[in-house]
Amino acid sequence: MSRREQIPVGVSLSADIEYRAGRPRPYRARVRWVDPSTRRRRSVSESAEDEDQAQAWLDEIQKAAQAGIDPATFTMTLAEYGQNVMTLATRGLEGKTLDPYMAGWRRRVVPSLGHLPVRMISNGAVDRTVHAWIADGCGRSTVKNSLAILVRVMEQAVRDGIVDRNTARVTGWQHEYKQAEDELDDPRSLALPDWTALTDLAAALVERSAGQYAGWGEVVIFAACTAARIGEVSGVRVCDIDRDSWTWTVRRQTTPGPGGLVDKGTKGRRAQPVPLIEEIRPMVGQRLDAVGDNSMARLFTGPKGGRISTAVLRDATHWDEVVTRLGYEYLRRHDLRHTGLTWMADAGVPVHVLRKIAGHGSLSTTQRYLHPDAQSINAAGDALSTHLRGRRSPAGPRLRAV
């Protein structure tokens, strides 16, 4: 359809099909209407290869006008429609979510499907497109974000009456990320093996960073020993540390937002206490002393005093290069949290306490870190035997007559 004329909603349309011999698309379908504001007669047309195509175009335009839908949107491509309705489709999204969604729309959805009319976005087309993204090496989160924004745009198309159902809701693509799913089910597999591995990693990251800034190593050690997210480490203020009990109350985190990094509440809006173990107390104490009486000062910052994010830590320390050299190719910054929770579970921290430290909403999430070894299983059997012996009568067990 020509973009020069926009058909007003609800106007009465007249339609005709004209055959023009000698043209590659000889059938011209045309609709006419009277503009309600100027009272001038307007028209818009579309060429087709055969009469059936021309009639189908007319039917769609007339159906849209009768339903009170802007006929212009009825024949828009996905890219055009998304541009028109994106504000509605993304309402309620925070910047941290909106930014990767919009990146997925620009880099994946529009190049793959943007040229198709919205009404031609079929379930099969979306399914093939998603699997093409995976074949191109897109990560699981990239595919998820790209598909999520497509679902939102198509949901708006359902509300506008352009399509009857949301064809972007496809399933099954997650199975191609079996390794990622296995890691999610077994976060213990992502943990560093021991304290030496952690300190060696911290030292290597410091050595590789510009100016060999010691703060990067301290951030890494603090995150692992408290099972914290990097954003939560960046959010630590002096007032959050209780030096008498050596505990840290997690209250805020630093996350990407519109215009840069922003501070906000913790995930789940829950404040949780976390113990500060002996190994990191001297380092925390030195930082508290250096800050002085400023209770709202950050405990950890970048070398120039800026806020820290996982991306900042990665780039400043050449993280990917360092972990590969140390033999931990899989290791991400978030795996420092998996390391801390795994170590605490192995140390015998009760699951309900571990859940409190982690800030998990579901106990089943925390239980993924529990992995009883043979010694623990044998100890459980011994405990049951001791319990049963204590409940027996002095004369020994009785036998029932049969």
Image (tube, rainbow, N blue to C red):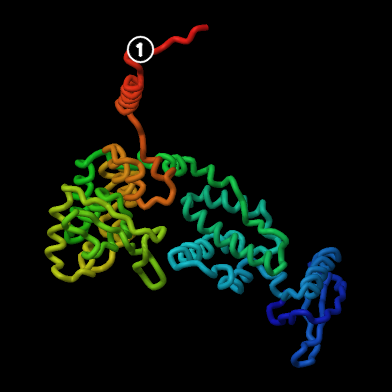
Residue 396 visible within the image: yes
Task: Give residue 309's position: percent from left, percent from top.
Answer: 32, 61
Q: Residue at x 15, y 55 (%)?
A: 283
Q: Please, is residue 211 above or below residue 377 in the view?
A: below
Between 266 and 81, the residue placed more toward the observer is: 266
Between 358 and 327, the residue placed more toward the observer is: 358
Task: Give residue 77's position: percent from left, percent from top.
Answer: 66, 67
Residue pointed to by mark 1: 396
The answer to which quarter of the image holds residue 353 is: top left
Q: Please, is residue 402 above or below residue 95 in the view?
A: above
Q: Is residue 316 left or right of residue 65?
A: left
Task: Give residue 246's position: percent from left, percent from top.
Answer: 19, 54
Give the class, few, some or many, for how many residues have Cα within 10 Å of label 1's Cα (few <14, many ≥20). Answer: few
Q: Is residue 66 left or right of residue 283?
A: right
Q: Which amino acid is tagged 1? A: Gly
Quarter of the N terminus within the rendering: bottom right
Q: Secondary structure at mark 1?
A: loop
Task: Give residue 371's position: percent from left, percent from top.
Answer: 36, 34
The answer to which quarter of the image holds residue 241 is: bottom left
Residue 374 visible within the image: no
Q: Please, is residue 186 above or below residue 116 in the view?
A: above
Residue extending farthest to the top is: 402
Q: Residue at x 52, y 65 (%)?
A: 106
Q: Residue at x 15, y 62 (%)?
A: 288
Between 55 and 61, the residue placed more toward the observer is: 61
Residue extending farthest to the bottom is: 38
Q: Please, is residue 224 above or below residue 390 in the view?
A: below
Q: Residue at x 31, y 40 (%)?
A: 345
Q: Is residue 263 left or right of residue 78?
A: left
